[in-house]
């Protein structure tokens, strides 16, 4: 039977994962100016989406990316261009990985899925930065300002050589670093998180059956214990009676000897 898409479990998990992803996207981020341009912030907001995609399928995983970016729109400083770029890159990471893992739910399948997702996002990140993001920033702030933000890292950079420095030496290693962290955490956390959620949303009938079985086993153990105790008491009573009878017999025998 085909599982329902909009279930209480799916909606609840998606809401929690969206909230976590949004917090990571908005607040839990930091630059590494000694390695990358200052406007590139290390953040791991794709990780909850990837976990969701592994647990609930590629559609739910992609929706987490969409919801995260929509929640960020009211706080945008790039007229939505930055959020659109993050949306495309996030889906490029989560969607192919979730599709692959859905067909091959093994450890090797998970490793292949995460590697393919990482490669897809890096390719899309190179395209999005080269075609959409950098042209937008250059138009909004001017090429001199954009180039000037990279002169500390690349002293010989210029407008004509900007993409030759920025894309392979900043965008590629930047995304490889943060996506590797997301992938490693997903690989080691996914199974444990999935089991926890399944226990939390287990049907009540199964819980009741389990409780009833446990109670039945405890009752059987109690009855057996009482039976053993009763047998022990019976044996002790029989031994006591036999001992009393023996003592009485010895007493009668002694009396007869005295009379003789």
Image: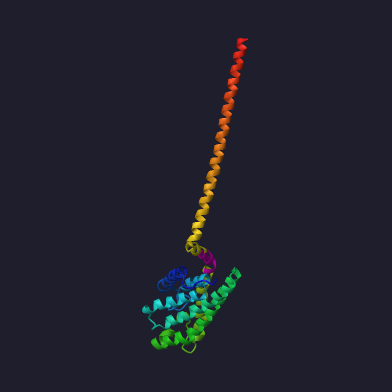
Identify the residue shown where x is 52% and y is 68%. 185
Q: Is residue 243 above or below residue 99?
A: above
Furthest-left residue in this view: 74
Q: The C terminus lies in which quarter of the figure?
A: top right
Q: Is residue 190 magenta?
A: yes
Q: Position of residue 40 (x, y in %)?
A: 45, 78
Q: Main secondary structure of the magenta part?
A: helix
Q: Residue at x 54, y 47 (%)?
A: 220
Observer-nearest of 231 and 128: 231
Residue 164 visible at all: yes
146 or 240, which is in the foreground?
240
**What is the total number of numbered labels drawn onto the structure image?**
0
Q: Is residue 100 left or right of residue 129?
A: right
**Colour treatment of the image:** rainbow
Q: Residue at x 53, y 44 (%)?
A: 223
Q: Nearer the viewer, residue 9 or 95?
A: 9
Q: Position of residue 14 (x, y in %)?
A: 45, 71
Residue 156 in view (yes/no)? no
Residue 152 percent across, percent down from the top left: 45, 80
Residue 14 is inside the magenta segment: no
Q: Nearer the viewer, residue 156 or 192?
A: 192
Q: Quadrant of residue 97?
A: bottom right
Spot occupied by residue 150 in the image (x, y as percentages of width and height): 45, 82
Quadrant of the image occupied by residue 1? bottom right
Q: Which residues are magenta?
A: 186-194
């Amino acid at each position: 039977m085909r599982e329902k898409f909009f279930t209480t479990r799916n909606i609840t998990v998606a809401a929690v994962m969206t909230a976590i992803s949004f917090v990571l996207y908005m607040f839990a981020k930091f630059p590494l100016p000694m390695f990358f341009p200052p406007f590139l912030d290390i953040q791991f907001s794709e990780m909850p989406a990837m976990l969701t995609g592994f647990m609930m399928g590629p559609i739910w995983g992609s929706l987490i990316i969409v919801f995260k970016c929509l929640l960020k729109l009211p706080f945008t400083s790039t007229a939505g261009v930055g959020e659109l770029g993050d949306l495309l890159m996030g889906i490029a990471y989560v969607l192919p990985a979730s599709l692959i893992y859905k067909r091959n739910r093994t450890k090797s399948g998970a490793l292949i899925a995460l590697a393919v997702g990482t490669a897809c996002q890096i390719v899309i990140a190179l395209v999005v930065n080269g075609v959409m993001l950098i042209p937008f920033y250059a138009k909004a702030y001017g090429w001199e300002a954009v180039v000037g933000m990279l002169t500390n890292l690349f002293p010989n950079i210029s407008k004509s050589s900007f993409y030759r420095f920025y894309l392979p030496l900043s965008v590629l290693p930047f995304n490889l670093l943060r996506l590797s962290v997301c992938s490693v955490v997903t690989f080691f956390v996914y199974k444990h998180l999935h089991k926890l959620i399944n226990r939390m949303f287990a049907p009540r009938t199964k819980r009741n059956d389990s409780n009833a079985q446990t109670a039945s086993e405890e009752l059987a153990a109690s009855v057996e214990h009482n039976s053993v105790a009763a047998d022990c008491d019976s044996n002790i009573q029989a031994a006591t009676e036999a001992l009393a009878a023996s003592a009485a017999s010895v007493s009668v025998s002694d009396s007869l000897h005295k009379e003789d």
